[in-house]
Amino acid sequence: MDDSLASQEQELGTLIQAAMDVPDPNPQFFAELGERLERRAGAMAEPTSQPQFPERPRTGLFWRPLWQIALALLLVIGLAILAIGPQRVAAQVQSWLSYTGWFGFVQLDQTWVLSAPAQQEQNGVLVTVTEVIATPERVAIRLTSRTAAGSPVKLDPPFSNIKLLLSDGKELQAATAAAGNGEGIFEFPGLPPGVDRLTLVIPPDAGAENDVAWELPLALQPAAQSMAGVTWPAAYQPKNGRASVNGVTVEVMAVVQTSQATALQVKFTGKKTGAFNPAPQAPSGQLFDNLGHAYQPSSDPSYENMNFLGVKVSVATPMGPHISDETSTVAAFTFAPLSPAASQATFSFDGVSVDVPADVSFTFDPGPNPQVGQVWDLDKTVAVAGAQLHFNRARLTTIPGDSGQNEPEEWYVLTFWADSPIQDGRRVSSVEPGFEFPSIPSDRMTIYGSSTGQIEIQLYYRQLPTGSIQMTIHRAGLVLYGPWEVRWDLPKSGKGFPPRSLSPENSAMTVNGISLQVQRVIASDRLTAVNLAVLGGLPQGSTNWQIVEAPSFGDVYLEDAAGKRYGQNEQVVWDPGHNSESYRDPHQLTFPAALAQTPFLSLNIPAITYDQPVQGNFEVETPANLDLAERSLDYRWTNPDGSYQTSPVQQLASDPWEVDIPVRFGDYQLHFDQARLVRPAPGRDTLILHGEWLSGIDESRLPAGFHVARITRPNGERISTSLAGLGREDAIHVNVQVYREESGGPWEVEIHLPVTDPSTGKLLPGRYRLEVDAASFVTPGPWKIAWPMKP
Amino acid sequence: MQQACSVQMPDLSKQAEIELVASAQHNPAAFRGLYEQYARPVYRYLYSKVGNQVDAEDLTSQVFLTALEDLGKFRNQGGFRAWLFTIAYSQAMDYYRKRHAELPLDELNLASHEPDPLAATLRLEQIRRMREKIAALPEEERELIRLRFVAGLRYAEIGEVLKRSEGAVKKDLYRLLARLGEQMEDDHG
């Protein structure tokens, strides 16, 4: 079939692609999102004492439906109260709720399950429907396929034709299907009320010989009456399982613990201030136990159990006039299973985001004749729902237009920067502004918001913006800071293997002159965490040493006495201080729990990298008036061992030209011999320098790059590359790649230097001076360090 | 005039992808490389689903910001591309769910680059008919078309995104293309 498929694709593919033709991303958007990701990546890389939230675009997609959801929620509350009566709700909820790993939370009184497994045998293959879970929202069917001898048989039905025939004569088409070797799960839309007899129809595979149709009649019964075929773990509600901070209440409504997972139902309640939506912008909550384990969420929070939660809201919030002041949303969180040795758990949530209406404005006057490149220092503070937003700067620049339709030759871009310090546990993270010049409408506006309170707004004009401008903020996103911590006692769930800490002796090894030592090991029934240190051998003043893997170096792994290897896994990490210390310490490695009785463990470290301070500088000339043409250039992906892969990238580029630039920093000599100008997007001119690393390295000390600390532009501007973050358009990033064609061959170097004038968005030709302050190296191992696990 | 262009995602080798992802997991700044590699196919895939630039840009932003934030959780099962497009698929599904929108396949610009005017006309007619055929397909089959011919995913990667086996994806695509081919032939006849 593969050949036939390839032939068909060849025949129809071009036509289909033409019919499905869609545009490429706007280069401006592409460049801006790239910069935004870089800023976010920079913020992630730098530890901060401030609580951090993932920055997500403020698009309206997350927000608009939420008040509708809240409204629907309140309706459900009312109906539930009418149907059940408020006093009975709490008890009912506890008996109704359960959880199963392959389906999620279920409300048992609204769930139907298979009354008995259904089987059919044809051509020596036995298909058995083992489980069905049917709720008003969806139906999930789990089945197996085996030979008479019990061997799994691969199920590969044509997905689009799988259906359910219902007892009322209707049909449901499969919405999703996952079929593997010997098992499958098919999902369908929810059943109509009253339907408890169905037939699963799997049509024959026309492409396979002797394939047959499967028709399996299924009988359902209420899950609340019978547990047949399904094991329902009991849900419990923690005592005092709520925390209120900053006007927001986080409540752990239900917990289900199984050997596969720990699942939480969590409700967030806040004052209705527009849309209230804690989860999409907040970090996933973390679960801790009293032993020092931190459990990472195994998937994004799910919002699929709103009906059940509607009922529960009524328990927490008695019906009354004030209910219209509050709104809630609920999420299901799933974590790795809690340690059986733990007696207490803490669910922690650092912050939530809310969307609030605002009505604040101020006036900005760039004057009658603003100049491109002009900067205005501002000092305008506005209050938004109790948070302060301080506009501190504005700047006028130009940027070349894209070559697309309706694009001007160049845009005038007016950029505003604002910051929002944390005050009273809140700050502004995004805004929805409006700007009005009396007569000049802006064509486009981009807004960058961040949970660090940095906001950047760019307005694009086709003509020079002059005169007074009225700036209005209609809505804003706020981050409300907690932390919210909900702690509860865990039911006894069996014997565990509580963590023990070891400081092994004689656990050091020296390779290529560098000594590594295992300093501490934490071993528990959930993890093995190893702390590593460099005892000596790094060049004087070296910093930032890290463990690296590469194709020719191998992987980091732990090995027990039986030879079983464990790769790194951070589903559960060691974090007794609840401060993400394991993530902040690059020398703490986390693995799954090793065999409890292993007499020893050994750790494999394939290579390390480190930075060495050096001093050096060099200059490069960027010519004006280079001809650029669309070319296919190789984008290079380098590995720490110098190997690399390339992929072609289409972009505007000049012909390469020869240069002769010797570079020396410390004991290292490089020589650049070729240059080329590329323009990946308008306003993103980049000079690529290519050369060779000539001296100061060997196979025990491989070059990994160098760090350009400062750049002096042809106009005399001296820029530090350490600047980063919103509002720092003068920040510049120089990409340095070091690689070689083959092991043992010469080392080549390529640097990518931005050469655009940030004021005009155009090439700034002339002489650039680059100052280097550090070089990076890799020393390969492996270090194989073993230690006894006896206390 | 838009060009009806062929799209095939740059075929970064599996090992290169693994290494690059590992690099970005240790140093988020390296994520830029992944973004530059995959921004275009992700955007085009999302555009083909939502049918307008504004929402395609919003969703593309969400996909890459989510991927950057969640990269630490990625474990290389099934490959980064499949993981990234699973996020894109999921974001698009949320978009439909929240907006109750119909899945669009309209407002595409048709253009031909045939030098011969008659050939160009015939080509445009073929494209128009193919568009009609695709528009009439069930959504799951259109999704196969998008993931294969707009996103440029491999069969196994499509399987990862749709939670199906590679073989099942191949079979469905085989049948789908055969049907489309027959329909085009029938029209012609």
Image: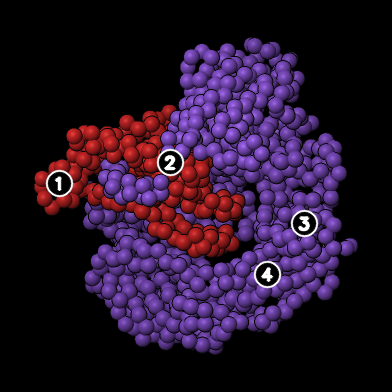
Chain colours: A purple, B red
* Quarter of the picture holding the C terminus of chain A: bottom right
Q: Given contact means CB atoms under 8 Å apart, are the residues at marks 4 and 3 in contact?
A: no
Give the mark toward the camera: 3 or 2: 2
Q: Looking at the picture, how far across and down is residue B112, in whole percent?
A: 19, 47
Task: Name the chain letter of the residue that bears numbered label 2.
Answer: B
Residue to which mark 4 is pinned: A605
Q: Mark 4 and mark 3: span between their CA atoms?
A: 17 Å
The residue positioned 79% from the left and 59% from the top of the image is: A522
Q: Real-space Cα distance between discs 2 and 4?
A: 44 Å
Q: Chain of mark 4?
A: A
The amino acid pointed to by label 4 is: Ile
Q: Which percent across, then down, holds residue A329? A: 60, 30
What residue does disc 3 label?
A594
Viewer-nearest of labels 2 and 1? 2
Rounded to the nearest angstrom, the CA distance separating label 1 from label 4 is 61 Å
The amino acid type, in three-letter code, at marker 2 is Lys
Residue toward you, A80 or A168: A168
- Circle 2 or circle 4, nearest the eye: 2
Q: Disc 2 designates what residue?
A: B171
Q: CA distance from mark 2 to mark 1?
A: 33 Å
The residue that mark 1 highlights is B120
